[in-house]
Image (spheres, rainbow, N blue to C red):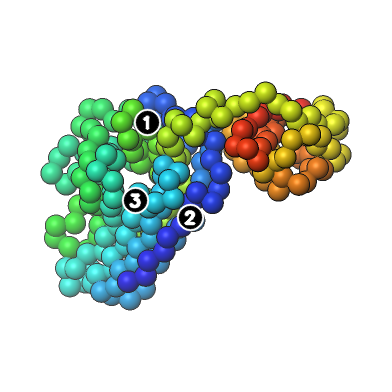
Amino acid sequence: MRTHLLPISALLFLSAPASAQLHAGEVPLGNSAVDVGIDLLLTETFTQAAAYFEIDCDDQPDIRAMLIHGAPFIDDPNIAMLHLLDDDLELCADLASFQRPKYYAFDQLLDCTGDFDWQSDSVNILGDFGSFQAIGPFTVDSMYVAYRRGTQVGWILLSFDLNAGLSARLKIHQVLPICPASTSIATHDAPATLSLFPNPSDGGAIHVECADALHSIELLDATGRLLARYNGTVRTIAAPEAVGAYLVRASYADGRRSITRLVRY
């Protein structure tokens, strides 16, 4: 069995709570989607692989993605699964006995209503192929599943193909994490002692002026997506390539943070 732990928290999240009226693929202002990059591929029968990822910014794995390659030709199925490792996590799944998750297309409302409800089963079968009991789906291409903790909702973008000749594959592309409110921007915001010149920028180098010691400088787009991160000693950063409004977040050595607006024309 091959197991990998992905240190998602090595990326610094902007962590405003996700809305219950979230749409698939939506990244609320103040949050960031994370490229997970899990790609499990099995080509031999009677093998399995797993990878862990976290979704709440605490450096501990919360969900395990698992792929099983059986032997479909002798009624031993290929199976893709998600294991919820925390008791307070819930997945939007079918109320029927087979409890498959609800799959959402991009921009579809994560409503979890009708024949679906939030369920806290630790083992969730995404799909299967190759037995009399298998009910599918056996292939999903870049669809979203919804999860929640309390009132915070996030999504997981995934694909799998359990009938790809002699192989089986499961990919976890991206997740929208839910992080504790105590790590939100609003909690740590401070009056900015950082200034940028020139601002607005015409695309040339941008000079950073700050009298206080900095831990890091981050360039974000208008959705809160991280574009670049610099060490706190850097005092010249590259301007964004595209025209538009951006945010520069400074993390100070004493733990404070500030946000400065940057315009690129």
Graded by Cα atoms within 10 Å as few (under 14), some (14 to 19) or many (20 or more), the crowding at tag 1 reads some
Q: Does residue 151 appear in the picture of this structure?
A: yes
10 Å neighbourhood of mark 2: few (<14), some, or many (≥20)? some
Would you name the residue on which mark 3 appears? Answer: 63
**What residue does disc 2 label?**
7
As drawn, the label of residue 217 is: none
Placement of 94 over or under 8, stated as above or below:
above
Whole-percent x, y for residue 213 in the image: 72, 40
Q: Identify the amino acid type marked 2.
A: Pro
Between the C-alphas of marks 3 and 1, the distance is 16 Å
Q: Residue at x 32, y 60 (%)?
A: 66
As rendered, which of 204 and 130 lies closer to the eye?
Answer: 204
Marks 2/3: CA distance? Answer: 13 Å
Quickly name the residue at label 1.
152
Q: Is residue 176 above or below residue 66?
A: above
Label 1–label 2 contact, CB within 8 A: no
Secondary structure found at label 2: loop
How would you rate the neighbour count of disc 3 (Cα within 10 Å): few for under 14, some for 14-19, many for 20 or more?
some
Of residue 186 and residue 76, the one placed in the foreground of this image is 186
Residue 262 vs residue 168: left or right?
Answer: right
Q: Secondary structure at mark 3?
A: strand
- Who is closer to the viewer here, 187 or 53? 187
